[in-house]
Image (cartoon, coloured by chain):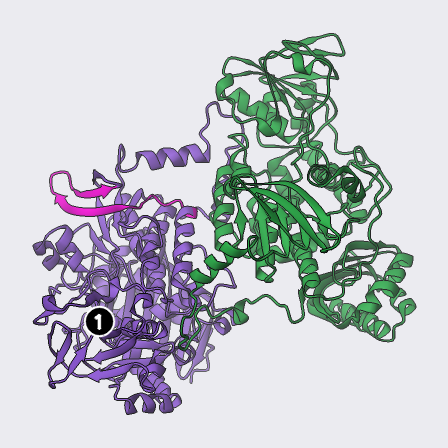
Chain colours: A green, B purple
Amino acid sequence: MSEKTPTQQVSEWLTALSAALDRGDAAAAAALFGEDSYWRDLVTFTWNITTAEGNAKVREMIERAVLPAKPSAWQLEGEGTEAGGVTEGWIRFETGVARGYGHVRLIAGKAWTLLTTMTELKGFEEHKASTRDKGVEHGVHPDRKTWLEQRQQEAAQIGITTQPYVVIVGGGQGGIALGARLRRLNVPTVIVEKNERPGDSWRKRYKSLCLHDPVWYDHLPYLPFPDDWPVFSPKDKIGDWLESYAKVMELNYWGDTECKAARWDATQQEWQVTVQHKGETVTLRPTHLVFATGMSAVPNLPDYPGMSAFKGTQVHSSEYKSGEEWRGKRAVVVGSNNSAHDICADLWEHGAEVTMVQRSTTHVARSDTLMDLALGGLYSESAVKSGIDTATADLSFASLPYKALPPLQVPVYQQMKERDAEFYARLEKAGFQLDFGDDDSGLFMKYLRRGSGYYIDVGASELVANGSVKLKNGAIERVTDSGLAMQDGSELKADLIVWATGYGSMNGWVAQLIDQPTADKVGKCWGLGSGTSKDPGPWEGELRNMWKPTQVPNLWMQGGNLHQNRHYSLCLALQLKARMEKIPTPVYALAPVHHKS
Amino acid sequence: MSEKTPTQQVSEWLTALSAALDRGDAAAAAALFGEDSYWRDLVTFTWNITTAEGNAKVREMIERAVLPAKPSAWQLEGEGTEAGGVTEGWIRFETGVARGYGHVRLIAGKAWTLLTTMTELKGFEEHKASTRDKGVEHGVHPDRKTWLEQRQQEAAQIGITTQPYVVIVGGGQGGIALGARLRRLNVPTVIVEKNERPGDSWRKRYKSLCLHDPVWYDHLPYLPFPDDWPVFSPKDKIGDWLESYAKVMELNYWGDTECKAARWDATQQEWQVTVQHKGETVTLRPTHLVFATGMSAVPNLPDYPGMSAFKGTQVHSSEYKSGEEWRGKRAVVVGSNNSAHDICADLWEHGAEVTMVQRSTTHVARSDTLMDLALGGLYSESAVKSGIDTATADLSFASLPYKALPPLQVPVYQQMKERDAEFYARLEKAGFQLDFGDDDSGLFMKYLRRGSGYYIDVGASELVANGSVKLKNGAIERVTDSGLAMQDGSELKADLIVWATGYGSMNGWVAQLIDQPTADKVGKCWGLGSGTSKDPGPWEGELRNMWKPTQVPNLWMQGGNLHQNRHYSLCLALQLKARMEKIPTPVYALAPVHHKS
């Protein structure tokens, strides 16, 4: 161990980095990083979300992105800390056009990880706290416009006589969070949403749905939930919150508006977005188009023989509402992830006879254990009490490069296995096929790699374990007129089949609204290229296409869980604002497309 | 100066107090207070809002209220501080049934001021932070009710098949803040409001209205404004906020519901409250009835001869909407306080020819100066930055007894006079008659004593000073068919007369809805009994009837500005909750009634 304090170590490292960068000496700067080091940059230097992995790539990024951005004013924020041989600290810095915040971890005096993230563009800061608007213009002003008149005028004109700079397709949590960020940055925006009211995309799901992530993980930007907000928000309550939020944030939210088509007008250098707005066709002409259509927007329906011949009712899980009408009836739910479990429980609670069809292994994590072992350090009441606010938690989370995550996750899930050993034994005894991910890295990695493959247990596993919900393992051969014929020769009779078979890649929406070639050019969304199930390589380093430039100029993807929408919406909003203000945004390391879907 | 640290001084004082109280020794406890000392108690010991003034009264309160409440667990919270010979500190304590928080100031080792305020009832704590509800009941529960179903069921039943414990008449900021407190404490409540939507009482006022208090002073309980909220909220924006707030807080808010009558049913020991609810007559039967009808609810129309003969338009300021239709017309505004100035400016901005009739002297404070000198220490961005959160600011504010306030206020307004000397000179030159309160104690004392008599200048004074708005001083003799005849023989021609002549006492609403004898029994509301203009003595020590027991059992008054509604709503909510839970609530020092209105 060094005899220097952690604060001294981080400060001296920053001074050395600063000096090397000031000299334009990429080699010297890179020499401050270890061999297996990472520099993760959110927008600041790269106008991208990208991680340089390994010393050579770090040096390349310094040369080609960091130096040109004129970094300066590197300083430690607060005190450095040390634990287990890793010294770390929060940092501030600037570029020629922006201010940034970040985090560094040193091992033996060299950087292991560096996170740099843009907080604001110089000259285009949000008006807040001491720079907030006054609200009333003091003095007297003939024919002044009131707040209401200005707001009504804007709402009446935007998209009709004036054009928004950004159109967001999809007014769920992703569209709303980004909309709030853009409003703060004075980027004229219209959100189009096929449902009537903000929050409807939650309200219209099955009755028993609650958020599976706890409240501390779920705050929207700028307006945290009050301190009595339930740990797991019921769907209608979060729906109402989103509606109030959209109103309070003064979003131009076009409900009851379906996006029908979009095309790039190369002459005008703008999109033509055709929407059906309360029954009328309107063409919007924004410079940028954001798909916030949800991770779960394009239902995956399997294509088994005989599906059309089934005489009962069959629905994709996204269309399932409630078990009320299935009391005493036979229901078969195909799938074994979150929705499948929730729907099985809902059907059983309403007195249906339920069978779950498990076609492949599934990761199950008990909600309490997950909160305790995986989330509690950053997102919990005790984290709040120990002073970790949401912003700090988000940045801590972001400071670990994806490549470095799996080995850190494995022990968490090992502990989970041990703590809940009895629970897992009972599930397995009932025939349920468990996994913990291809490399035992558990739930969060599954979420990042494929957005599926797990159930956060809030009770349904007990129904499977005790046989209340029947379990059928194996592959389906075909659908009969009265149920499912399995490849093992058995048959499952059903009045209702629920296909809880997941969703396709978000670029399916690009195909629907623009065309297939554009969707192919954007490529698959989400996933890391880990080479594990449903996440084919090569390794990408970051989530494909999310919140960052895609191969199609002026086309963007926004989405994820509430945490991601909160945190990464700022990255995307700053990228859009910079373009609106004609600030140069040279994109470094634009990701190539390896998979079309 | 003592050689002991402030922390030691406060701790030792608390130890001595605690020991004396433990022995039941009121004399020894009182001996720890100075001769000119104050013990201000919000609910904790007295089930009242009352201040014992002077050592003898303090001793009496200790004997008759404090000791019976079984105080214990006195302790200093954080560190004591010392400035100008006053040592102070925050404190915690308990009674037999509640937990409390407070503040003490020591001079020469003896208490000068002690504030004790109830924070929660033992066993009936709010579910928040680590005790928040889970939101979803994990496990499986046949026929479980979702959040939405429970909420809808409650809303459908309350007031119809089940009876609320509390009915609040008036759904403005006062009713809404109290409603939120009661919801947190699980006190079944219905708010009745004649307007359709929460916030309408703001929306329906004159177009240019903005809050005159700054945002840091205006937060509602539990859900602070986001950090970009404008300093002075425009009326429609605060209206929208109140509407979202009422929804998020899950209030049973009956809009479009006019309270027609109320009477106490002595047999049933409950109120019969007759309301017109969306056109239908409904009788509510709550145990407690709260008037949250607003400080400004019963318009004061003067009774000049000839008023009915006036051929133009005349409205009370509460009915005034906008100057739009008065362009080029002659408008006379009678009055010289806030509303009068706002309306004069609005009329002038719309091109009317405006005259203000000033009948008596008025206190004018420039908004910026007021924020800087009078509010900035507790309610400002710099206060927030120095760690003074809203709760701390509210309690600091509450810790100074009303009796001790005026001498502390005088120097503030002396400084204001000096800083804005040029401004005041110009106003006086234009003939405007200024005052700074009978005893030069300024705006806040005027607000407490009479709720009127001042203008917070946001621009209209300039119009008066430069003659754009004409000024007429003096008394009105009568109204003619075409304007006003003044006692000095002059005449003011008018197409519009606005009577900006203020409002009556809140118990006017009691007379309207119950009867005059009950209103007389409640007596005048607001004011301190200071013996200054419009606030006749004898001295009361606290605001008459507000947020505390009145002479009419089970009848309560809620109101004030946003700060007061936020802070004192907790006092009132705890008093109501204790009664619902049958916790003994012996009221000490119930205020007698000296004035009927």
The answer to whether residue A478 is above or below residue B314 is above
Q: Is residue B257 magenta?
A: yes
Can residue A60 be seen? yes
* Image spot of residue B429 (x, y percent): 29, 92
Relative to A81, B78 lies left or right: left
Q: Quadrant of residue B347?
A: bottom left
Relative to B135, B345 lies left or right: left
* Image spot of residue B595 (x, y percent): 11, 66
The answer to whether residue B124 is above or below residue A164 is above
- Span of residues in magenta: B248-277
Q: What chain does mark 1 sit on?
A: B
Which of these two is toward me, B49 or B327? B327
Which of these two is toward me, B361 or B465? B465
* Image spot of residue A552 (x, y percent): 77, 49
All told, the count of numbered labels is 1
User: Quadrant location of the N terminus of chain B?
Assistant: bottom left
Which of these two is toward me, B221 or A45? A45
Q: Residues within 10 Å of mark 1 (few under 14, many from 20)?
A: some
Q: Residue at x 24, y 67 (%)?
A: B317
Can residue A524 be seen? no
Q: Amino acid at mark 1?
A: Asp
- The residue tagged 1 is B495
* Image spot of residue A410 (x, y percent): 77, 40
User: Quadrant location of the C terminus of chain B?
Assistant: bottom left
Q: Quadrant of residue A522?
A: top right
The answer to whether residue B133 is above or below residue A430 is below
Q: Is residue A127 magenta?
A: no
Q: Main secondary structure of the magenta part?
A: strand
The kind of secondary structure element at disc 1 is: loop
